Amino acid sequence: MTSIREAYDTMGWGTAPESAATAQAWLDKHGKRFGHYVGGEWVSRDGGEGFATINPATSVELARVAQASPEEVDAAVKAARAAQPAWQALGGHGRARWLYAIAREIQRNSRLFSVIETLDNGKPIRESRDIDIPLVARHFYHHAGWAQLMETELAGYGPVGVVGQIIPWNFPLLMLAWKIAPALAMGNTVVLKPAEYTSLTALLFADICHGLGLPPGVVNIITGDGKTGAALVGHPDVDKIAFTGSTEVGRIIRIATAGSGKKLSLELGGKSPFIVFEDADLDSVVEGVVDAIWFNQGQVCCAGSRILAQESIAPRLIEKLRARMETLRVGSPLDKSVDIGAIVAPVQLETIQGLVQKGIDEGATCWQPSWSLPKDGLFYPPTLFTDVTPAATIAQVEIFGPVVVLMTFRTPAESVEIANNTRYGLAASVWSENLNTALDIAPQLKAGTVWVNCTNMFDAASGFGGYRESGYGREGGREGLWEYVKHLGRDERVARSEVEQSAKGGVLLAPRSSQLPGLPPIDRTPKLYIGGRQVRPDGGYALPVLDAAGNQIASVGRGNRKDIRNAVEAAHQALEKWAGSTAHTRAQVLYYFAENLAAREQEFSERLGRLTGRAAAEKSREVAISIERAFTYAAWADKYDGRVHATPFRNVTLAMNEPIGVLGLVAPEQAPLAGFLSLVLPAVAMGNTVVAVPSERWPLLATDLYQVFDTSDLPGGVINIVTGTRKELAPVLAAHDDVDGIWFYGPREEAAEIEKLSAGNMKRTAVSWKDVDWADPHEGQGETFLREATQVKNIWVPYGA
Ligand code: ADP
């Protein structure tokens, strides 16, 4: 009889194939023949030269793709040029709405994108589904934020104009996102050429832009090989080229654009060191190597392809690596339990085979697992070379496949010397359980990214790019934006602000928002909003709400001390999770809120008019400002970064912004919607939870928001609303020991009382008795609010030799 242990050890893996049916249906819809997407239309679908795009796992043709001629490149550049002024004039908020709509649409189609990416490129579905596509959506969300903030954060800068973008095949859609999101955010229009092996997700992207109704010419996708790329690079009316690919082609492009005035960013090859010190956690190191070199079949420009292991632990590491390699699975990329998929194209496979042979010929020891590869398709096993000298070809040349070399070193200084012994400088990772060692080595490495005890980490908030022959320019984060803007001269600044003024309310071009059910009827009696639920006020009393003519149109709950206590408790319960959620998650909730509020713009505006008796223009302006404010703080959520202080010792000091905790917010009487949200949104964007007391006179605007919050994935307890009289409620909040900060907008005598009461637990206060113009983007929003919503923690970290 077999024991459970034996059964477990000998258990085989079944296959878990992902269905390709929806992807096939999409290909069929296009007749398996694609043209270019230019000026908002599909062109050259049937005419012209074309080529097949192949599934590398099966060698089966997926579709035929067109080869753009110089004339077609010219047409695409013209379309982009024609679309650029209006795209720029749409303003930051308008573009933010578009990028947000694209992000949402990518998420809605995420599985289709993943499957097509896997079919076309050969990467495991696990990676396209869990890494590539989520990062793509994240990139568009993040840059929706930069569009929103451009006018204040990059004041004095404008778009470059028309951008030509050329990308490789290893992360087809992700590289597209890295290129298109920042370019569009900054007001540029683009002509993008995907790599010839992997055009399909770029074409699907064009399809979804089309479906959303993106203004024609803003995004143009042309397909073709290097000849098309060269025509785009050489086009006289392109203002900037952004390229990711090989160092060889990067060099050609640098020379081709020399003296043309074109701005240029290049993200090129690498041979990144992966340095393992003797005090590293070797089991983590082994998993790190799997991520470093067997992720995406090793076809990663920043792949950790040179393991440098400290001599004392090298034999143990090699043994552990070989054992782990035995358990890796190579096979059909659509199989959800496969680790390594197919190599993108036959020529790439031949290059890998050739370089491995060269390694053997030069005397290194080659090791591959004992299992055999699938018979059909372009597969290559994980490969480990030992006994490699630093000058060997396989230690110097980028192999771009699942092949890693291992060399040894004795001292930290020697590790740095070998690590830097390369013409590249894209990335590096350092493994040591000793922080001093890791942070002593990191600044000495010549690389644009250094990962400590991790590898191949990417995010839209952090710049990525190279040193030396790995290229220049950064993609992602604030530093990535500089690639897509130029400093405006004085005249341009004036002209631009005039264009923007006239384009305000560019809602015309803004995307359609989803339809949601209407507002509750006007005669409802809203309750309080505590812990994500509507609850009756403890006291059982209500307050009348009058319209502009003095008629009672509703009543709201009159909250008391007990209700505030319950709300504070709910806020506390929600705090840990909300403060601990990622900034990206908080941003998404706020964008979703903006979207849902926008869907009800009309009703909110009518409600405001009826209550306040304001004129049409004024009331709709308040609602528009409120929606825009949600976009602003969604944008800030993952961008109100800390800083790194250069303290004059052997260290750096990380200044991190942290939330304060539970904030009590007493909203201004005027601007019942915009004023209320101008306090609530920055507070929650920074990770605080709140108990808010809305305008006493016009609380219905706040209570109408309950349902908007409920449909926006806002966790219960993050925003709690207690209606009632300010004089009764505000002092309770101010005196409450579990409230960490209070913002108060009301009369001066009351403000003084609030500040006095706050002394009990020394809560932070921000009070104002002045009339604030909530519509003013400088007065009603911005860093003042973000600063009040955060406290800075300085972490001193050793750094440098
Ligand atoms: P890889 O080695 O990753 O295949 P390449 O640098 O060959 O990278 O290709 C990256 C991208 O550059 C592809 O989209 C390819 O079509 C394009 N390309 C190749 N040659 C040229 C060229 N001379 N000018 C512009 N683009 C080119």
Image (cartoon, rainbow, N blue to C red):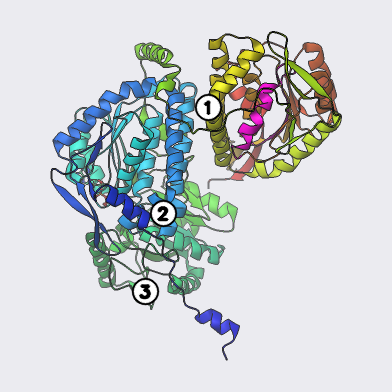
| 349 to the left or right of 341 | left
Q: Name the residue under label 1.
A: 598
The N terminus lies in which quarter of the figure? bottom right
Q: Is residue 466 magenta?
A: no
Query: Does 447 sit left or right of 358 as displayed?
Result: right
**Is label 3 or label 1 in front?**
1
Q: Position of residue 165 (x, y in %)?
A: 29, 38
34 or 462: which is nearer to us? 34
Q: Disc 3, ligand 1: is the CB inside 8 Å?
A: no
Indicate the amino acid at tag 2: Ser
Density class for disc 1 (Cα within 10 Å; few <14, some 14-19, many ≥20) is: many
Q: Mark 2 points at which residue?
A: 128
Secondary element under disc 3, as helix, strand or loop, is strand
Measure the C-alpha gap from mark 3 to mark 1. Answer: 60 Å
Considering the numbered disc 2 on the image, is that residue within a helix, a strand or a loop? helix
**Tag 3: residue type?**
Trp
Verify whether residue 701 appears in magenta.
Answer: yes
The x and y percentages for residue 227 are 16, 43
Between the C-alphas of marks 2 and 1, the distance is 33 Å
In the foreground, 152 or 268: 152
Tell me if residue 73 comes above or below residue 58 in the rendering: above
- Which label belongs to residue 367? 3
* Residue 498 located left or right of residue 550: left
Q: Are marks 2 and 1 in contact (CB under 8 Å)?
A: no
What's the magenta region? Answer: 686-713
Q: Residue 685 appears in which quarter of the rendering?
A: top right
Quick one: label 2 or label 1, which is nearer the N terminus?
2
Spatial distance from mark 2 to mark 3, Cα to Cα?
Answer: 28 Å
